[in-house]
Image (cartoon, grey):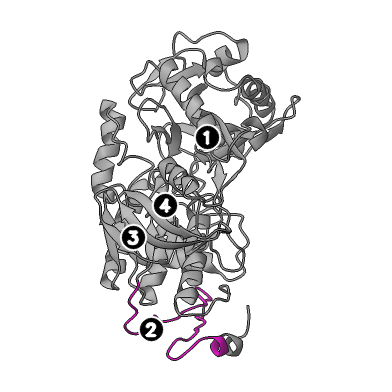
């Protein structure tokens, strides 16, 4: 970290740097008095939430726009899909206060490099909002959905207390950009679906990986976007007791150990790699669709992790070579397989499913075995081979057998596959300048978090939100140097 004197030299007036005793946060600058413009943040997942919190703590009074509803109202809409098969395209697992991470295992670990300890700031704020203090010292901290809901509400209240503004059901219709003859642009305003126009030259794009309409709008506006790799596959469910026995042996079931997890990878003969993703011990498979006529799955756990099944995504790596064309072709690729899953599931948001034994044998499943599916609004037993590309089906079949050699019983005939998992990460990157954190060709647009291709998971998205907030603050006070 640069020394404090050097940083003080580049800041003005009453702005200052403070280093907390536990290094929880290293950069604080105050907004100038009478600052006319307010930064706008699009999206209130972990990235947008922390970008808003940091800017509010520095006095910049951010405006946060969230297309979905407040977290408790959103929860009711999400249950509407899970219990009644009724999808609200604007309020669901993907859209709403807290983002997709709200309905997840609440994992708070990451492999990102974090020399400035921004991750410590994230954990500290979570504890202040009601997370268990253990998240700062256990090796794989998690929170769970129910705790996340109340935590998010407390953080929202803090942002508002500090002068920030949060607008729910505020879908962005357009980001207005002035562009010169050389293609260089400057953000001028954000226009909402209800006609509201917010004049601003600082917009944080923290929309998450499923805001496909926003990506299409920005692409049409000439914002530089690149395709990127992601993964697709199925959710697999086993009895949690089987995983516990395989991992803990005679100590399986010990209360100090809790539910066992796993992390697996296999390099296949066809050149593909299959790996486990977002493993949820003692959890459930959840409906995560955000668009009509498409089925998407995800995994979720409560803090207790005491449901009967373990589940994880088994996914195959996809590269831009698999979906050649324009930069948004990856979105079209995802939609194709989500639509195939909707059709295979019966076109009522039930998910297509197949027992592992039948999947390996290449025959449709007609009845369940020992594993009771957790997915609601329900599953439809079928042949999953129509729900993913042939190379992915071949790779997952090979990987299941290989994983059975690592975890005894993993390829058990009655284990259940449910399709499809397509939203592992964003299929695009809204590329930004490394120094200023702004779009390569559009000043004032700050791509951030998972949707923009710069994070993967709650912690990394929150850390990226902090970094981007620092960059916005520096630019707004006339200091264009990057954050520390």
Q: Which mark is residue 58?
A: none
Residues at discs 3 and 2 in contact (Cβ within 8 Å): no
Query: Would residue 127 be counted in the magenta stretch?
Result: no
Which residue is situated farthest in the front direction here?
Answer: 181
Which residue appears at 44% of the width and 55% of the height? 206
What segment is highlighted magenta in the picture?
Answer: 8-37
Image height check: is 213 above or below 42? above
Question: For residue 64, which quarter of the picture?
Answer: bottom left
Eyeballing the image, is 201 above or below 255? below
Q: Residues within 10 Å of mark 2 (few under 14, many from 20)?
A: some
Expressed as whole percent of the image width and height from the top left, the position of residue 185 reads 50, 60
Q: Earlier in the sequence, mark 3 or mark 2?
A: 2
Q: Which residue is mark 2?
A: 32
- Disc sitting over residue 312 in the figure: 1
Give the residue pinned by disc 3: 64
Q: Is residue 12 magenta?
A: yes
Name the one closer to the observer, 471 or 359: 471
Pair 2/4: label in front: 2
Closer to the eye: label 4 or 3 = 3
Question: Mark 2 or mark 1, which is nearer the start of the sequence?
Answer: 2
Front disc: 1 or 3: 3
Ranked by sequence position, the earlier of labels 1 and 3 is: 3
What mark, if any, has residue 143 been given in the picture?
4
Q: Secondary structure at mark 3?
A: strand
Q: Residues within 10 Å of mark 4 (few under 14, many from 20)?
A: many
């Amino acid at each position: 970290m640069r020394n404090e004197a050097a940083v003080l030299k580049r800041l003005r007036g009453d702005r200052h740097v403070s280093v907390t005793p536990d290094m929880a946060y290293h950069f604080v600058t105050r907004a100038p008095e009478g600052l006319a413009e307010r930064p706008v943040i699009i999206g209130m997942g972990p990235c947008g939430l922390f970008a808003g919190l940091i800017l509010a703590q520095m006095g910049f009074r951010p405006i946060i726009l969230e297309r979905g509803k407040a977290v408790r109202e959103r929860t009711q809409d999400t249950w509407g899909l899970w219990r009644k098969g009724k999808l609200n395209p604007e309020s669901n697992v993907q859209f709403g206060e807290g983002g997709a991470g709200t309905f997840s295992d609440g994992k708070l670990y990451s492999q990102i490099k974090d020399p400035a300890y921004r991750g410590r700031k994230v954990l500290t704020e979570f504890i202040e909002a009601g997370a268990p203090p253990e998240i700062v010292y256990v090796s794989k901290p998690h929170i769970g959905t129910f705790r996340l809901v109340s935590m998010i509400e407390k953080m929202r209240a803090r942002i508002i207390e500090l002068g920030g503004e949060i607008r729910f059901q505020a879908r962005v219709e357009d980001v207005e950009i002035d562009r010169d003859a050389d293609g260089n642009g400057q953000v001028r305003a954000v226009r909402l679906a209800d006609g509201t126009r917010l004049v601003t030259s600082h917009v944080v794009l923290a929309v998450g990986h499923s805001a496909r309409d926003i990506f299409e709008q920005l692409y049409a506006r000439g914002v530089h976007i690149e395709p990127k790799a992601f993964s697709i596959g199925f959710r697999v469910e086993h009895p949690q007791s089987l995983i516990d026995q395989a991992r803990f042996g005679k100590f399986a079931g010990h209360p100090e150990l809790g539910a066992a997890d796993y992390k697996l990878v296999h390099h296949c003969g066809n050149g593909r790699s299959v790996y486990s993703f977002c493993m949820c011990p003692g959890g459930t498979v959840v409906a995560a669709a955000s668009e009509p006529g498409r089925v998407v799955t995800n995994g979720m756990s409560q803090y207790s992790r005491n449901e009967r099944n373990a589940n994880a995504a088994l996914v195959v790596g996809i590269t831009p070579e698999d979906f050649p064309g324009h930069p948004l072709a990856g979105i079209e690729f995802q939609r194709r397989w989500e639509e195939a899953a909707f059709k295979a599931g019966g076109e009522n948001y039930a998910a297509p499913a197949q027992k592992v034994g039948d999947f390996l044998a290449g025959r449709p499943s007609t009845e369940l075995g020992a594993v009771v599916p957790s997915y609601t609004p329900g599953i439809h037993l079928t042949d999953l081979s129509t729900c993913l590309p042939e190379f992915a089906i071949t790779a997952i079949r090979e990987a299941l057998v290989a994983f059975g050699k690592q975890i005894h019983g993993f390829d058990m005939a009655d284990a259940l596959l449910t399709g499809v998992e397509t939203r592992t990460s964003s299929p695009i990157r809204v590329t930004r300048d490394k120094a200023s954190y702004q779009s390569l060709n559009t000043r004032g647009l700050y791509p951030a978090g998972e949707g923009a291709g710069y994070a993967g998971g709650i912690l990394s998205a929150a850390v990226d939100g902090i970094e981007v907030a620092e960059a916005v603050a520096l630019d707004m006070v006339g200091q264009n140097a990057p954050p520390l």
